[in-house]
Amino acid sequence: MKDGIKDGVNVGSKGHSKGHSKDGSNEARDESGNEATNASPIAAVQGPAFEAGGIDRRNFLRLGALGLGATAVAGATTAAGCTTREGSDRVATGQARLGAAPAGPLVTPPMETVRIGFVGVGGMGTVHVRNFASIPGVEIVAVADIREEHAVRAQEIAVAAGMAPPTLYTRGERDYERMIGEEDLDLVFTATPWKWHVPICVEAMRNGKHAATEVPAAYTLDGCWELVETAEQFERHCVMMENCNYDRPELMALHLIRQGLLGEVLHAECGYLHDLRAIKFSDNGEGLWRRDHSWTRNGNLYPTHGLGPVAQYMDINRGDQFAYLVSMSSPSRGLQEYARENFAPGSPQRAETFALGDVNVSMIKTVNGRTIYLSHDTNLPRPYSRINTVQGTKGIFSGYPNRVHIEGLSEGHGWNDWTDWQEEHDHPLWKWELENAVERPGHGGMDYMEDYRLIKCLREGKQTDMNVYDAAALSVVCELTELSVAQGSAPVEFPDFTRGRWKEWQPLPLYEG
């Protein structure tokens, strides 16, 4: 094992390619995920590949957009023209086997102190360690990482904050299992490479601990169902830590929507547009594992930064739901050209080939008829953007640069700079953050805010801002886009992880500090 690599995969701490700060600077952020499975649990058909492949229509199952279970239907299609392929047992019977979802999102008894065990404390994991060390009511009990120096660094941060030295678990890639089994923990927090997020979260919940994970929470449909199933069975929180939900422009847009200033929300545009070529080819951090996914996967590998805030705007899982998507990818050129320009002839990097199209674009339709444009663009030269546009019947908020137009309040057809609206319409969380300003590590303060909110909800016994159903609905976009691309951009239907409860669950109250 060299520098956190075993068999070509870094299974310890992640790098730092997470998001984008409120002041416009580009910062890298890490990701997370689970083992890919051989069974493709859901696939779009009725495209050229369906006919050419000679697939027996009688073997197809439909996962209803309203979550009524998988029903064997010869050539079954939905109103959207989507059909889904039978996959693993979990996928074929998941919704029916799990039965009804809980009547409401999980709420657990308040806890005075939240005892945390960390798995993966590289770049982004260390940011979270620093944040949690400064939040009242937190005790960092244990740290697991395959690189001892990373674990020691986290231990020193905790001690400097006045805590007892956390116990270190550094014996190898699965030593987190020993930590989870031995330590008295309330929460296990993972900031590891994608493939480890589901195994770590599941291990935590099965041992009676809540789980929090970097993004995406999973990258297969099987993984998403496993998180939902385990969270329900053991009644533990499983929270995906989507920091962009807490950035100042996104929360201001949410506040404008809740105030009714944008009218009825009809459409949104979002994405993750970030030149990661140097990070992917780095010999440390995310470079040890992130490029690998581009070798064999073609779709949207990282959907949640842009889609998370949009899901909040549209009350996804709380009055509306993703229904289906179509996705397509451009040719793959960027990583190959970067390797040719930056590595010597004969180097192994120049021999690599990539399945991932440089630009993936997807369209999502919700059950209530809204539309969402979603983009993934990480292999080409470009400035950073998450797009962050939300269009309503009375106005629009658009990011990069951030600006607002509201009919009757903005002049003519012109834009107002978003700062013109901050004094009156800044989100309460950011007003609180600025009034209590201290130096907050991590993307201009939004990382601290997501960590603070998680602890606040656990200590007060409230539902978390994001729950396991949100983690699954956002993360499943990874595999659904891959399946749509593989089937000639055919529509692919979303499973309903809430099994119909989205029609009953109420929108989250506006966050307060």
Image: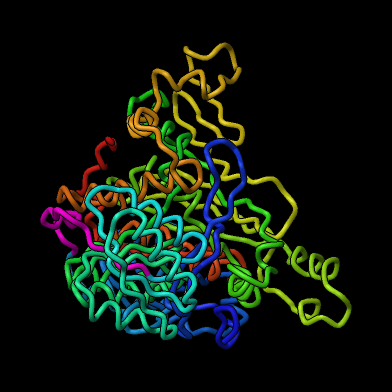
Q: Is residue 107 magenta?
A: yes
The span picked out in magenta is 101-118
Q: Is residue 111 left or right of residue 318?
A: left
In the rendered image, residue 59, in percent from the top left (x then y), is placed at 41, 83
Task: Tell whether 454 sits left or right of 354.
Answer: left
Q: Where is residue 271 in the image (x, y as percent from the top left)?
A: 56, 50
Q: Is residue 165 visible?
A: yes
- Image quadrant holding the N terminus, namely bottom right
Q: Is residue 168 magenta?
A: no
| Foreground pick, 479 / 301 | 301
Q: Is the magenta stretch mostly helix, strand or loop?
A: loop
What is the x, y in percent for residue 423? 42, 18
Question: In this rendering, is residue 359 above or below 389?
Answer: below
Q: Residue at x 62, y 51 (%)?
A: 273
Tell me if I can see residue 48 in this picture: no
Task: Give the residue displayed 25% in from the left and 59% down from the top.
Answer: 139
Q: Which residue is drawn at 35% across and 67% down?
A: 118
The answer to which of 380 and 159 lies nearer the viewer is 159
